[in-house]
């Protein structure tokens, strides 16, 4: 090598060195699994970190569309939630338990929505959006979460008319929950929040605040459905009690009701002696 | 005898010795005797670096191919040693000595300077060798320990062997 060009000489040395060293390293990598795996691991590590950086950049750039998709999904989910809540409120078709978890083995319940309701007349009625197609028939009890609503009088395929409890002609067999005595509840036609029980004798011990429930003596309603609480007690003619019952349910605000469909109505009817004759 | 053939024979003898004898000595993981580097040290002072690298690469590759270890590891280490050998030499030798026709040894450099030269060369060679062998930054302590132990052993070995050469060459 000429001494006159030390820089070129050095570069040439370096070049030869690099060529030979690369050959040696290739040989090492190709002939040793350990060295190979170590080198490959570090190369893969470089590759992975570069992929990661790329994907984070890509994610950042797509934030807007991701946000849009998420908000769209949010709206969709919220709509579905509303639907589900409505469904839950009206899905009291459970034959075992009603909306309060009470079980009435002789009845199954069909949820219905009130589409028409009157409370300010002497003979009030409701229209509900379930009919004979849904298994409803006349003389079925209609209840709600906090009490009795009325009795079905007519059914069309998809709608039913319900005589409200707020009807002066309507009578309901009830029981004083604590005392056990049975009486007849009848609306007096004046106050949509109150009804009266007038056929109990004065020896019955009761007090204001006692709960009134359905007796279950009719086939219309299951026993034990709470109706209201006693708000006033007075004695009539010395032997009769006049009780005022304030309803638990506000009839003006009713939206959903459950129709109690008796499971074995013929059996009960057939057992009655006057029918057998 | 022709210089080339003499050098080739020297390398062949040490490569063979390395494969047949020193590789098979089991002195533990810390001490790895490899006195073949003396072949590269005994080239003349002003020997061309490129040619020296070719010699070193060929010597290491021969040992790799004949031996049972990782192919390429001795070639790489000897190559690195050949690259730095002249620079290391210029650290211990004067310009007149380098321009002379002799070769490094006790006769030309004296004991202490030759010792330093050999030690530096062994450090470079062993460092490369053990780094390539473990290829991990987590074994620094082990690499240093192996370099120190093997280096000390090989230093003695190389000095002993080169004392024969120097005496023989003088006559």
Image: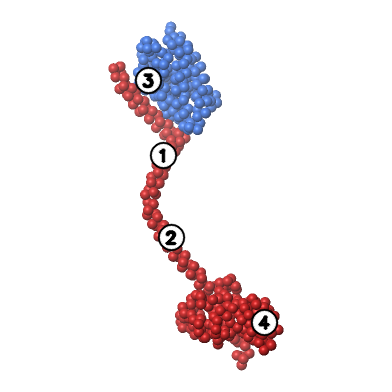
Instruction: Check chain identity for marks 2 and 4: say if they share one.
Output: yes
Judging by the rendered image, the residue that carries numbered circle 2 is A74
Sequence-wise first label, 4 or 1:
1
Please give the chain letter of the residue carrying mark 2.
A
Mark 1: secondary structure: helix
Dots 2, 4 in contact, CB < 8 A: no
Residue A65 x %, y %: 37, 54
Q: Is residue A172 visible?
A: no
Q: CA distance from mark 4 to mark 3?
A: 121 Å
Give the foreground label among 4 and 3: 4
**Label 1 chain ID:** A
Gap in angstroms between the C-alphas marked 4 and 1:
87 Å
Q: Which chain is blue?
A: B
Query: Residue at horizontal 33%, vertical 22%?
Result: A10
Q: Nearer the viewer, residue B32 or B93?
A: B93
Q: Which residue is mark 4?
A: A181
Tell me which label, 2 or 4, sits earlier in the chain.
Answer: 2
- Classify 10 Å Cα crowding around label 4: few (below 14), some (14-19), many (20 and above): some
Find residue A115 and report its horizontal and vertical position in percent: 46, 78
Disc number for residue A46:
1
A175 vs B17, left or right, is: right
Chain identity for the colour red used in the image: A
Query: In front of the other: label 2 or label 4?
Result: 4
**Closer to us: A242 or B38:** A242
Q: Would residue A229 be found to the left or right of residue A5 on screen?
A: right
Residue bearing mark 3: B52
Q: Determine whether label 2 and label 1 are within 8 Å by CB.
A: no
Whole-Å distance between the Cαs marked 2 and 3? 74 Å
């Amino acid at each position: 090598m000429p001494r006159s060009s030390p820089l070129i000489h050095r570069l040439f040395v370096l070049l030869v060195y690099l060529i030979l060293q690369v050959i040696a390293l290739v040989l090492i990598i190709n002939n040793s699994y350990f060295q190979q795996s170590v080198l490959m691991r570090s190369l893969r590590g470089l590759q992975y970190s570069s992929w990661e950086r790329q994907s984070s950049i890509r994610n950042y750039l797509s934030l807007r569309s991701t946000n849009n998709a998420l908000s769209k999904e949010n709206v969709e989910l919220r709509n579905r939630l509303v639907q589900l809540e409505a469904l839950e409120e009206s899905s009291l078709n459970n034959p075992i338990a009603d909306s309060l978890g009470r079980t009435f083995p002789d009845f199954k319940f069909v949820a219905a929505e009130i589409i028409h309701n009157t409370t300010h007349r002497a003979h009030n009625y409701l229209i509900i959006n379930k009919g004979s197609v849904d298994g409803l028939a006349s003389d079925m009890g209609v209840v709600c979460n906090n009490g009795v609503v009325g009795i079905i009088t007519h059914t069309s395929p998809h709608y039913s008319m319900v005589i409200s409890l707020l009807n002066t002609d309507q009578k309901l067999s009830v029981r004083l929950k604590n005392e056990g005595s049975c009486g007849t509840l009848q609306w007096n036609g004046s106050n949509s929040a109150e009804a009266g029980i007038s056929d109990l004798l004065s020896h019955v011990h009761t007090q204001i605040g006692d709960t009134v429930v359905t007796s279950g003596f009719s086939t219309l309603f299951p026993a034990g459905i709470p109706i209201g609480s006693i708000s006033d007690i007075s004695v009539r003619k010395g032997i009769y009690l006049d009780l005022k019952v304030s309803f638990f349910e506000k009839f003006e605000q009713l939206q959903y009701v459950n129709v109690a469909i008796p499971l074995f109505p013929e059996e009960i009817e057939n057992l009655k002696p006057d029918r057998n004759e | 005898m022709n210089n080339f053939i003499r050098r080739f024979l020297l390398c062949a003898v040490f490569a063979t010795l390395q494969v047949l004898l020193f590789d098979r000595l089991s002195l533990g993981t810390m001490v790895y005797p490899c006195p073949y580097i003396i072949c590269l040290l005994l080239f003349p002072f002003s020997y061309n670096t490129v040619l020296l690298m070719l010699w070193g690469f060929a010597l290491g590759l021969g040992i790799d191919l004949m031996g049972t270890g990782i192919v390429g590891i001795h070639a790489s280490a000897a190559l690195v040693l050949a690259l730095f050998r002249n620079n290391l030499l210029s650290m211990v030798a004067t310009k007149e000595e380098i321009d002379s026709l002799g070769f490094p040894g006790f006769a030309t450099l004296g004991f202490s300077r030759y010792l330093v030269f050999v030690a530096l060369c062994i450090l470079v060679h062993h460092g490369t060798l053990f780094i390539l062998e473990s290829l991990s930054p987590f074994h620094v302590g082990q690499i240093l320990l192996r370099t120190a132990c093997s280096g000390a052993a090989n230093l003695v070995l190389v000095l002993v062997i080169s004392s024969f050469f120097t005496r023989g060459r003088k006559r």
